[in-house]
Image (cartoon, rainbow, N blue to C red):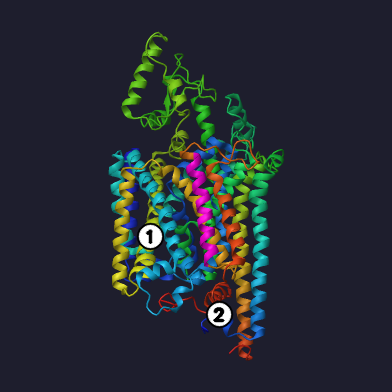
């Protein structure tokens, strides 16, 4: 049964290719940001914390590993989501326009 | 004015505000009742999510935990915030695009079986057996929400009893009545806007004392910076001073990593479990259904963590400062000179001094010398007997009576109760009485907002997923709304009864709810979105394996004296709090290994996954009433 609500069933190859590249870009962005997530939190905050603790955050009394576990990781987490929302909403818009243009040319029914 | 009058004033004003919002936001349709009509702006949803997420435990207990754990307290700070990254990147926008009302809805539709497709009008038995994934998901959601909400109701009662001087049970009943009114009246819409108000009450109440103390101790306005700054009257960094005091008293350095049973492997696993578990908790996920679009869902994820970070970045500052005050102002004091905060909290039994006879207080890590304790689960009469015998022992210089200290050490009750840190810090720093009263209103806001969010999940799981989707799919709008309100009412009563007669397991299970959510929900939703190949059978076996493994380990180690497993990585054995991360891996492994041997999902389901993944605005979100097979 073909459900017209679902675009993959009604798309011509160009539109399908555009969607595929959209999804690939999304996965790449997500992968990079999740690596940063793991590096800041699980890495600097835990795995390397004892090494980093030998140094202080410049200009403060914070041991660096401790700072990552209690402050730094959280700040980086907030920034990761901000970057994701900005980049992804832009990607959404660009591909939406691309697909509308394709359908106007007769790329999709 | 006294603290008491201020407290009544603030609590009365905030409650009037919540009820006013509830009246303004009353609703008449299921869409408003379950998902607030999907019209909540992203920033407001972020505030509501933050209030929903930050429970009485976050508000009252977390800073206390961090104060006693030092560096390792970071597992809670990182774990409970890091989960929002996973939630915002991996789940929220896709679930919003999917566009139903609940988490079991997604699991049930994505992992529906083929058998139902051929039947024109399935009967109830067929609907149950035809979609086992939905049923498993409903049970998981109910289990996680009920254990969590019982703890919240108890928290409401405890905060009331401390600040309004009523019985804990009376406090629970007052909390029940308030939640009952605004949850049944306004559903998700009422809850959302009340939570926005509650967020501001709780964050202001948390920040004001932290800023005041930071200025007092370090001359720095921002508590987060104050923690890393130098002490105001001395040219020494706050941390160096705190570490020195800690070491002098035998506690070990505050900032040192990996002390005792918190070795690297356990810190890692507990943090990871809390992160993944956060992303799998149903009452947080449903908040993302209430915004306009996937675009708004992404923004809402950012705002949620931003508003949570305001509190989570302040908690370590309160923790460090409170630790410092506690060690500095108590040690070596005579009875006459004890600070006033000590005296007002002594009456609650959360901090107790059993002197060794020299009339000089000692608070150290050495169990033979330490004189500071808390009453823990001791009853009033047990405590009275202990105090009387100890008094005799002191005044007769050991000839009569009994030393209470070894007995308390044996019960593991050394040191003040962790919960007094946030509540007593304003008094420690001798701040004005209105700030102290404001903190009480904040604590109530934190407990009430989480309780109402959880009650809505319970109501929608029963009224939408069980009643409408399984038992009576022909129910009309009015009837479904009635059932939804009825279930919330019933859930409030059940949660209240749990709060009045707390079953022993509640406090422990709340921590484990994260492990169970991590091992069951998270992998199944992620694979449902990111794989078009994973079908029903592997998903169900994966959930059962992850859940079974985690539950087995937790029950075994906590209740049946099973040896902790080390996996060859740690001498201390993996803490039951951290086993959820391993359970999650088991779930992923079982699902992915079984997948090649089972049938792929139907074309319809693959098309649904496609539509969830594509850019917004291209195809509309699935409308539950018109979706296939309903």
Residue B102 appears anywhere in the view: yes
B445 versus B461 height, above or below? above
Residue B343 left/right relative to B185: right
SS at mark 2? loop
Q: From which residue to which does the magenta span run?
A: B536-557
Q: Which mark is residue B93?
A: none
Q: Which mark is residue B456?
A: 1
The image position of residue B39, as x and y in percent, is 43, 70
User: Is residue B238 magenta-colored?
Assistant: no
Q: Which residue is mark 2?
A: B618
Residue B39 left/right relative to B244: left
The image position of residue B245, as x and y in percent, is 59, 27
For marks 2 and 1 on the same chain, the one whose residue lies earlier in the sequence: 1
The Cα–Cα distance between marks 2 and 1, rounded to whole angstroms, is: 31 Å
SS at mark 1? helix
Report in which chain the residue with disc 2 lies: B
The image position of residue B52, as x and y in percent, is 44, 55
The dominant secondary structure in magenta is helix
B426 versus B493 height, above or below? above
**Circle 1 crowding by C-alpha within 10 Å: few under 14, some 14–19, many from 20:** many
Q: Nearer the viewer, residue B519 or B486?
A: B519
- Looking at the image, do the residues carrying marks 2 and 1 touch, with CB atoms under 8 Å apart? no
Residue B44 appears anywhere in the view: no
């Amino acid at each position: 049964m073909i459900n017209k609500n679902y675009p993959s069933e009604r798309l011509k190859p160009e539109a399908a290719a555009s969607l595929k590249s959209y999804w690939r870009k999304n996965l790449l962005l997500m992968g990079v940001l999740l690596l940063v997530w793991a590096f800041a939190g699980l890495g600097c905050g835990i795995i390397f914390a004892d090494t980093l603790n030998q140094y202080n955050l410049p200009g403060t009394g914070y041991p660096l590993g401790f700072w990552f576990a209690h402050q730094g990781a959280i700040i980086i987490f907030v920034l990761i989501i901000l970057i994701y929302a900005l980049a992804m909403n832009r990607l959404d818009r660009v591909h939406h326009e691309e697909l509308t243009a394709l359908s106007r040319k007769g790329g999709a029914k | 004015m006294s603290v008491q009058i201020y407290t009544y004033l603030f609590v009365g004003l905030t409650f009037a505000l919540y009820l006013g919002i509830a009246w303004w936001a009353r609703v008449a349709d299921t869409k408003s009742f379950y998902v607030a009509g999907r019209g909540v702006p992203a920033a407001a949803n972020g505030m509501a999510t933050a209030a929903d997420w930050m429970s009485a435990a976050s508000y009252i207990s977390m800073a206390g935990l961090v104060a006693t754990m030092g560096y390792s307290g970071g597992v809670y700070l990182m774990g409970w915030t890091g989960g929002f990254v996973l939630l915002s990147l991996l789940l929220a926008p896709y679930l919003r695009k999917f566009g139903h009302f609940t988490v079991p809805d997604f699991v049930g539709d994505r992992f529906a079986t083929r058998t139902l497709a051929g039947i024109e009008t399935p009967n109830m038995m067929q609907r149950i057996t035809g979609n086992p994934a939905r049923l498993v998901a409903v049970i998981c959601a109910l289990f996680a929400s009920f254990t969590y909400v019982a703890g919240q109701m108890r928290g409401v009662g405890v905060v009331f009893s401390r600040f309004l001087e009523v019985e804990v049970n009376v406090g629970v009943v007052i909390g029940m009545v308030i939640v009952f009114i605004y949850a049944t009246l306004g559903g998700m819409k009422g809850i959302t806007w009340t939570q926005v108000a509650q967020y501001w009450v709780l964050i202001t109440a948390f920040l004001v004392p932290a800023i005041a103390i930071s200025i007092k101790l370090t001359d720095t306005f921002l508590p987060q910076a104050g923690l890393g700054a130098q002490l105001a009257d001395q040219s020494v960094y706050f941390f160096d001073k705190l570490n020195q005091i800690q070491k002098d008293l035998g506690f070990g350095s505050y900032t040192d990593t990996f002390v005792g049973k918190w070795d690297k492997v356990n810190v890692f696993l507990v943090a990871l479990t809390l992160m993944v578990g956060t992303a799998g908790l149903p009452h947080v996920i449903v908040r993302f259904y209430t915004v306009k679009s996937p675009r708004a869902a992404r923004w809402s994820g950012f705002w949620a963590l931003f508003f949570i970070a305001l509190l989570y970045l302040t908690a370590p500052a309160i923790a460090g400062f409170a630790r410092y005050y506690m060690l500095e102002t108590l040690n070596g004091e005579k009875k006459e000179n004890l600070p006033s905060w000590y005296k007002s909290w002594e009456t609650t039994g959360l901090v107790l001094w059993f002197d060794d006879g020299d009339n000089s207080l000692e608070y150290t890590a050495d169990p033979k010398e330490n004189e500071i304790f808390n009453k823990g689960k001791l009853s009033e009469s047990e405590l009275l007997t202990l105090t009387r015998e100890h008094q005799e022992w002191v005044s007769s210089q050991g000839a009569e009576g009994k030393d209470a200290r070894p007995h308390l050490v044996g019960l593991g009750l050394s040191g003040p109760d962790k919960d007094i840190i946030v509540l007593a810090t304003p008094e420690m720093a001798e701040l004005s009485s209105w700030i102290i009263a404001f903190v009480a209103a904040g604590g109530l806001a934190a407990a009430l907002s989480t309780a109402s969010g959880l009650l809505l999940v319970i109501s929608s799981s029963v009224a939408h997923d069980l009643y409408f989707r399984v038992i009576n799919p022909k129910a009309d709008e009015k009837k479904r709304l009635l059932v939804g309100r009825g279930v919330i009412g019933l859930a409030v009563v059940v949660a209240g009864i749990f709060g009045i007669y707390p079953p022993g397991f509640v406090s422990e299970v709340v921590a484990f709810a994260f492990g169970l959510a991590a091992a069951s929900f998270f992998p199944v939703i992620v694979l449902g979105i990111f794989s078009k190949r994973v079908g029903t059978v592997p998903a169900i076996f994966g959930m059962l394996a992850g859940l079974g493994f985690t539950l087995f380990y937790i029950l075994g180690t906590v209740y049946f004296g099973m040896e902790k497993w080390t996996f060859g990585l740690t001498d201390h054995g993996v803490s039951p709090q951290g086993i959820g991360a391993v359970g999650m891996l088991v779930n992923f492994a079982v699902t992915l290994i079984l997948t090649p041997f089972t049938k792929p999902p139907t074309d319809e389901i693959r098309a649904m996954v496609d539509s969830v993944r594509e850019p917004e605005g291209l195809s509309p979100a699935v409308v539950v009433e018109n979706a296939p097979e309903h």
